[in-house]
Amino acid sequence: MKHIIIVIHTLAVGGAERRISTAAGYFAAAGHRVTILLIDNPVVDFPLNPAIKVVCVNQNPQSVGYDPEKCELFKSEKTYKTSFADKLRLRAARLKGSESAAFAETEMFVKYRYALPLYDYIKQFPDAVIISFMTVPNISLMMAAQNIGNRVLFGDCTDVANEYPAGSPYNALRKKYYRRADAALFQTPAQKDYYTFLPGTKKYVIPNFVKSDGLPSRYEGERRKEIVTFCRLNKAKNLPLLIDAFALLNKDYPDYTLAIYGEGSLKGELLKKISSLGLENKATFYDFDLNVHSKISDAAMFVSSSDREGISNSMLEALAIGLPCVCTDCAGGGARMMIEDHVNGLLVPMRDVNALASAMKEIAADPALAQKLSQNAVKIRQRLEPDKICGEMLSAILGENE
């Protein structure tokens, strides 16, 4: 039995978080001791294997919705304040210019907000294998791991090459600290290919799994004339593109509606856009819902308008329940890995509103095509069966083939 520690921002929302919750359950069911360390939000909204321990290392966590039965708060005896030596480093960096200053300030933020509490927690478990997911947790873990001998890994869940703009301190922090990793997990070859600066790190490409338990069966009746998507409401999802494409479709198919399930900082902006296009009675937002799949299983189609993804969990789940899918061929390569155009979905160039609208119209106009896409889409369940994919993840985490 191994002790596996998983580091992530939160378990409150998100496809990556849902995937990690399921994988952690698989590891625990396989007999391993599993701890999930949350570095930001102590709220746990996903059901977990009761054998999993959840700990939040944020020293000043936001507690709205926090349940102490689900998550323990790690309180260090230390006070994480900038040391005199680091203050001098920051002052020197600021004298060198804005780029040096931005790097030093970001590095110090990550160090004192995340890495030091992480280090103080994980140093108690010298035999644990530790893996983090997503960029800030990854940098935080690799920074904390400089002075420990544990096996450490990081995992990417997005199009890392375009996550931050050129010159971002986070890109430089990756190059500085990721060298500590013993291995790394990627969802797509494109993610793996980004890391030319890690020639000695063992790299695994393991796609997302599709958890079919709890997902409804493919709907076989007449579908509602509703277009659906479910995702975080952030810039990477490019929901303005979807709204614009829907407006074009609605001119020819006025009986169709649009349903967007999700939460995020751009909701207000997106509502204004819908209003400006006169679509208030046609496009509706719904809060994040764990039962979203049952609510949308009989919809006309699922659309992903993202500019970047690793492998979109919402896309995989939409395929798995047999929704006819239209997805942008976004940076990161996940959509093109999973969708064979006009076989199990439609793939369109990203940021092309006319191409996206045309694909949506094609499904609306051709029930036979919609039926074909639906029937082929559900085959993804066998291709990405959870036990198979989680088994590959566990083998990589433990380094069984290295």
Image (tube, helix red, strand yellow):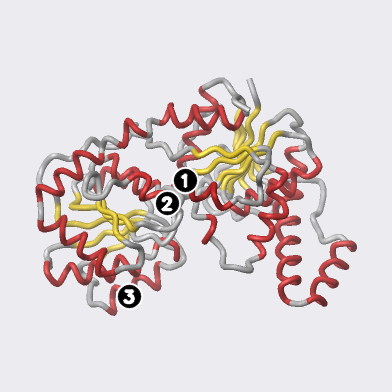
Circle 2 residues within 10 Å: few <14, some 14–19, many ≥20: many
Residue ID at (69%, 50%): 140
Q: Mark 3 against mark 2, which lies toward the viewer?
A: 2
| Callout 1 touching callout 2 (CB < 8 Å) | yes
Q: Is residue 49 left or right of residue 352?
A: right
Q: Which residue is mark 1?
A: 188
Which residue bears the numbered disc 2? 333
Q: Quadrant of the C terminus?
A: top right
Tag 1's secondary structure?
Answer: loop
Point out residue 251 in the picture as x, y percentages from the top left corner: 14, 72
Alpha-carbon span between mark 1 and mark 2: 6 Å
Residue at image location 21% in from the left, 38% down from the top: 218
- Disc count in the image? 3
Badge 3 or badge 2: first in the primary sequence: 3
Discs 1/3, front: 1
Residue where numbered disc 3 is placed: 273
Vertical placement of residue 90 versus 76, above or below: below
**Amino acid under disc 2:** Gly
Image check: 158 left or right of 154? left
- Looking at the picture, how far across and down is residue 328, in whole percent? 33, 58
Quadrant assignment, res 260: bottom left
Q: Amino acid at mark 1?
A: Thr
Horizontal placement of 52 versus 74: left or right? left
Label 3 residue SS: helix
